[in-house]
Every structure is written in structure tokens, then in C-alpha cells.
Image: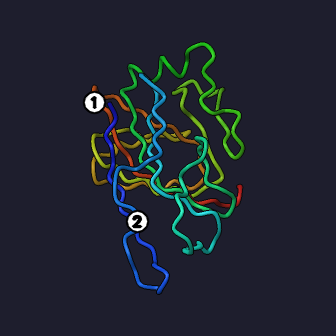
Amino acid sequence: MPRRFRRVVTGHNAAGKSIFIMDGPAPTVFDRGPGRTCVTELWETRTSPADNTGNAEVTDHPNRLPPPPNGSVFRVVEYPPDRLRVATLRGPGESHDKAREGYVRDLANTRHPGFHKTDTIDYAIVLSGEIYALMDEGEVLLKAGDVLVQRGTNHAWSNRTDQPVQIAFVLIDAKPL
């Protein structure tokens, strides 16, 4: 069972005073089942600069990897161990989001079936566990507290442990290379 994250969001009342508008479990969780990543959407923006007006829920949308054009997304992704995930990604009928706009899966990469890239700059913070960040050339082991700045590169995530790994991501729309 994936971890539930408490989300506290601030806003403004009718008089313009700062208030807490939301406090509870993040309402949008995409748990795709055993061997697949679980994504908890925490917030998103749809413009740059961001629009802080209104108090509406902004994560109530279909699952997608990239942020909206000129926007950003803040989420936590839980990666299961590769012994489960790799078999699932290579399984029959698995698309691994290859048809989504703004997302390109590297189907020719034989190192890991999760290789992909988006037209984004991503800030990744490992919350728990350890995971390898794979590039076309090279890999780096990241542990809890480590940060990766991913700049529109072809990459994959490899969890070689027996425990799930949780990573907080901020994805910001970027110009394609």
C-alpha cells in the first residue's frame, strides 16, 4: 500500500487575509497496481508566472507525466523494486505512457525499459530509500536527502533494493532541446 501524503495548502479569504484552504490526504493518487509506480499529485500550475487566485482543487485530472504547457507539477512517485517493475514494463500490452503528449519513451534502450524524456526541467528529491538515476551514459546512486536536477535528458529510474523508493518531483515545462 503506497504511503498517503498529507497536503496543506494556503490561500486567501474574501477579505484578502491568508488562510489554510486545504488540509488532509492528497486527493489525487494514481496507484496502477503491483509492479507499477504510484503517483501522488500534490499541486500544479497552469501558467507562468503562476496564478494564485482562487481556491479550487487543481490536481483533479487524468494521470499524465508532463505538466501543462507553461505550467508545473509537484508530485511524489513511489517506485517499486525493479524485480517487480521491470517485468511489468516489459509485459504484454504495457505502454508505459508512450502515447502521451510531451513524453517520449526510449523503446530502443536495452539498459532499462523505463527510459524516457520530457520537455521539462525536473527537481527530484529522494524522500526515502535509494535509487539509481540512469543516463544514456552513466548512472548515479541517490539516497534519501539527495537531489537531482534533470534537464530534459533521456533517463530512467532503477530501484535495485527490495523496498519501495519515494521521490518528490517538481516538473516545470521547458523548451525542447
Residue reaching furthest to the top: 92
> Of helix, strand and loop, which one carries label 2?
strand
Neighbourhood count class around disc 1 (C-alpha, 10 Å): few under 14, some 14–19, many 20 upward: some
Of marks 2 and 1, the one in the foreground:
2
When asked about the image quadrant of residue 4, the answer is top left
Height in image: 127 above or below 8?
above
* Front residue of 85 and 106: 85
When asked about the image quadrant of residue 136, the answer is top right
Q: If you read the primary sequence from the N terminus, does the residue marked by circle 2 or circle 1 appear first? A: 2
Q: Quadrant of the N terminus?
A: top left
* Front residue of 17 and 99: 17
- Residue 21, position in %: x, y? 41, 67
Residue lying at 54% horizontally and 74% vertically, measured from the top left:
52
Height in image: 17 above or below 154?
below
Residue reaching furthest to the front: 14
User: Going by the image, does 75 lie left or right of 60?
Assistant: left
Q: Tag on residue 163?
A: 1
- Residue 127, position in %: x, y? 30, 49
* Front residue of 136 and 105: 105
User: Going by the image, does 3 lie left or right of 117?
Assistant: left
> Of helix, strand and loop, which one carries label 1?
loop
* Front residue of 172 and 39: 39
Residue lying at 55% horizontally and 15% vertically, measured from the top left:
91
- Of the residues shown, which amino acid type is indicated by label 1? Gln
How many angstroms separate mark 2 from mark 1 (CA)? Answer: 30 Å
- Residue 44, position in %: x, y? 54, 59
Height in image: 114 above or below 133?
above
Q: Tag on residue 150?
A: none
Q: Quadrant of the C terminus?
A: bottom right
Residue lying at 48% horizontally and 56% vertically, measured from the top left:
74
Label 2 sits on residue: 9
